[in-house]
Image (spheres, helix red, strand yellow):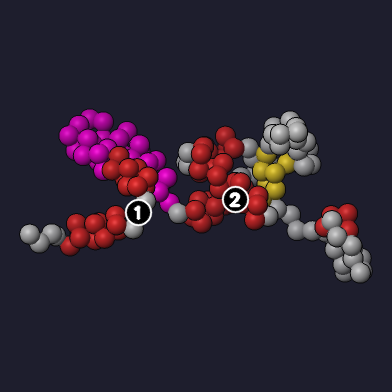
Amino acid sequence: MDQPPAERRRDFRDRKRTPEELAILQLARDLNSLSERYPRFRSELFKLQAYVRNQLQPSDKKQAAIMRCLKNSGWPLLDVDELVTDTNFDIVSVRTELAAMVAQGTVDEVNRDGNVPRRTKDGRPTDHVYYRPARPAKSTPGGGVSPALSGTEVL
């Protein structure tokens, strides 16, 4: 009747998860049980389990990992494939978080030259899109923000 404390805590955490998160978590738990049944493949199954559990991180943790990767990569620009490799998130998560970060203004979407990428009529970029941490607006000598960069007039 009474569950061990670890199972009670697990059940309590699981009640707060979405159905998608529960499916991912069940896959991770199945991988764990497979690693116990097949010790020969334990290390590979643990790697896969870690990858699967990594997808359960909340959005703010994913964005922090992407930003850390952008700032510490040693390259001025990174594309989605490089971010997927460096952060160990799936491509859907990286694209979703990048879209949110671009909307928030914390990340710039640029082409290879560092300029805003050209887009077709339906909004798709014509160039390969790279990402970099957002740069602050440049100030004019008088202390105001440059109208060319901000899109507003300085009074």
- Residue in view at x 24 percent, y 57 percent: 11
Magenta stretch contains residue 50: yes
Residue behind mark 2: 100
Q: Tag 2's secondary structure?
A: helix
Q: Are the residues at dot 2 and dot 1 in contact (C-beta closer than 8 Å)?
A: no
- Residue in view at x 65 percent, y 52 percent: 103
Can the viewer see residue 143?
yes
Residue 123's image quarter? top right
Residue 24's image quarter? top left
When the figure is inspected, residue 23 is found, relative to residue 151, above or below; the finding is above
Q: Position of residue 104 (x, y in %)?
A: 64, 56
Q: Tag 1's secondary structure?
A: loop
The kind of residue on which mark 1 rests is Arg
Residue behind mark 1: 17
Q: Position of residue 19 (x, y in %)?
A: 35, 47
Q: Tell me the magenta residue range.
A: 28-57
Q: Position of residue 35 (x, y in %)?
A: 23, 36
